[in-house]
Amino acid sequence: MFDKLVARTTVLGSMVWDNARRKFSSNHGKCSGSSAAAPSTEPRSHSSAPSDTSRRSFFQFAASAAAACSLIELRAIFEQHALAEELTGLPQRPVAAEEPLYMLTYDHGGAVLWGIDSFTKNLRSAVAWLERYPSFKIGLDNEAYTYDLLTEQHPAVLEELRGYLKRFPGRLAIGTATYGQPLSCFINEESNIRQLEYAREVNQRMFGTTPPVYAMSEHAMHCQIPQLLRGVGFEGALMRTHFQMYGYNPTFDEPIGRWIGLDGSSIPAVPTYKGEGAEFFKTTEDNWILTRYPGPECHESLVDFRKKFARIHPTVASRVDDGGLRREELVKEYEGKPGYRWILLEELLGGASRSRSRTSHRTQRLHTADAMGILWQRNLEPLP
C-alpha cells in the first residue's frame, strides 16, 4: 500500500490526447454484418481478430505449493452468480434463464478536448434518457480536472451535475478514475500515482463518492496497475481498452479473475474476452455495438454479442466512449427486455462475499508482450 502523498503542488501533465481518433477514414472497416455505409469517426470493432493469448486461461490455479494463501471469495459479479463451478475445472454451466447480459455504458469526455459546452450537452442528453427509460443507467468518465475547472469557472454547471446525481441515485454515477486521462504506459512512476490519487480526492471532495472499479476508455493498463489500484483504494478493475488506438491488453476466456501485478498485489478484474477485441485502431466489439447499433455502421446487436460469448457466465458488455457516441435506438430497443440489464461500476463486484477460503494450488505465471512492446507479467489467480 502507498503512504498518502503529501506533495500536491506539481502541475499534472499527461493530459494526452490525439485528435486523430476523430479522423479515421472508412477504410478501417465496419462492424460485423454491416454493409457499406458512411465513414466512421472511429475504427471498427475487433470482433474477428485473433488473440495471442488464446491458449491461456484467465483462471489459473495460483498460490504457493509450500503455503496456503487466502483468497477473497467473489461469489458473484452481480448479486447471485457463483464462480465456484469454474474453480473446480468442471464444464461451465448453461446460461440460466434468469441470467442477463449485463450492460455498462459510460460517457467519456471532459473539459480538456471537448469543452464545457459539450460536457453540458452530453450530460443533459444522458439525463433525458434516464427520464425516458426507467431501467437505463449511465456513468460519466470525465477527467477529474473538469470538476476542478467547474468549481472555478462554471459553478452553476457543477451544481446542476450534483443535482442530477441526487435525483438519479443508482442510475447516474461518477466513473472518473484519473485526473487527466493519461495513457498510463507513457507517464512516469509518480505521475501514475498522482493521476489516481488526485482523481479520487477530487471525486470525494466534489461528490462524496468515487468509483470502486477502475475503468478507462483508452489504453491505461500496464503490469503495475494492480499495485497502484490497491494502493489508492480501488476494489476492482475492468481490464478493457475500449478504444485501442494507442494499445490494448491481453484477452481471457473467463468472466472474472484476480489480476496480479509485479509486486504480487492483486485485484479482482473483469477481463476482455478472447475475440472481443485486441488490435490497434479498433474498438472492442461490445463498445462498437453500444455506440453504433442500430445503424448503417453496425448491424450486430447485443443479442448477437450475447450468443457469441455464451460460454462466459456472467457476461458483461461495456462501453466507455465519447458522449456523442451512443444511440438512443439501442436503449429503447432493450428497455424492459428480459435478459438484459444495465449496471454501473458500483454493481460490478457487488456480490463479493466477505468469507475467505484457504487453498493451496500450483502457481502459474504468464508472460506476454503487450501491443506497445511493454512486458506484461501476469500471475492470474482463481476466485473461489
Image (tube, rainbow, N blue to C red):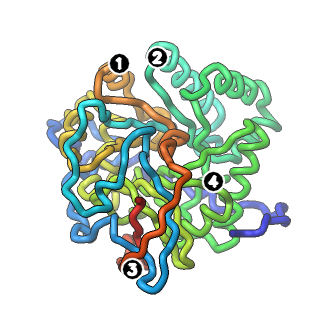
Q: Which residue is mark 1?
A: 336
Residue at x 55%, y 40% (from the top left corner)? 346
Say which of marks 4 and 3 sits in front: 3
State the CA–CA distance, disc 2 to disc 1. 8 Å
Residue in the picture at 45% in, 24% down = 136
Mark 1 to mark 4 CA distance (whole Å): 33 Å
Q: Amino acid at mark 1?
A: Gly
Question: Helix or strand or loop: what does disc 4 sit on?
Answer: loop
What number is the disc on residue 134? 2
Residue 4: percent from the left, percent from the top?
79, 64
* Separation of marks 3 and 1 at Cα, in angstroms: 44 Å
**Mark 2 is on which residue type?**
Pro
Q: Are marks 3 and 1 in contact (CB under 8 Å)?
A: no
Q: Nearer the viewer, mark 3 or mark 1?
A: 3
| Label 3, label 2: how far apart the Cα atoms are | 46 Å
Ranked by sequence position, the earlier of labels 1 and 4 is 4
Front one among 180 and 134: 134
What amino acid type should be assigned to the residue bearing mark 3?
A: Thr
Quadrant (top left, top right, bottom left, bottom right) of the C terminus: bottom left
* Quadrant of the snapshot with the N terminus: bottom right
| Residue 260 horizontal side relative to residue 96, left or right | right
**Residue 363: which disc?**
3
**Residue at numbered disc 4:** 178
Front in this rendered view, residue 80 or 158: 80
Q: Is residue 276 above or below residue 366?
A: above
Would you call the spot at circle 3 few (<14 residues within 10 Å), some (14-19), or many (20 or more)?
some
Asked if labels 1 and 2 touch by Cβ distance under 8 angstroms, the answer is yes
Residue 243 spot, x, y in % from top left? 41, 52
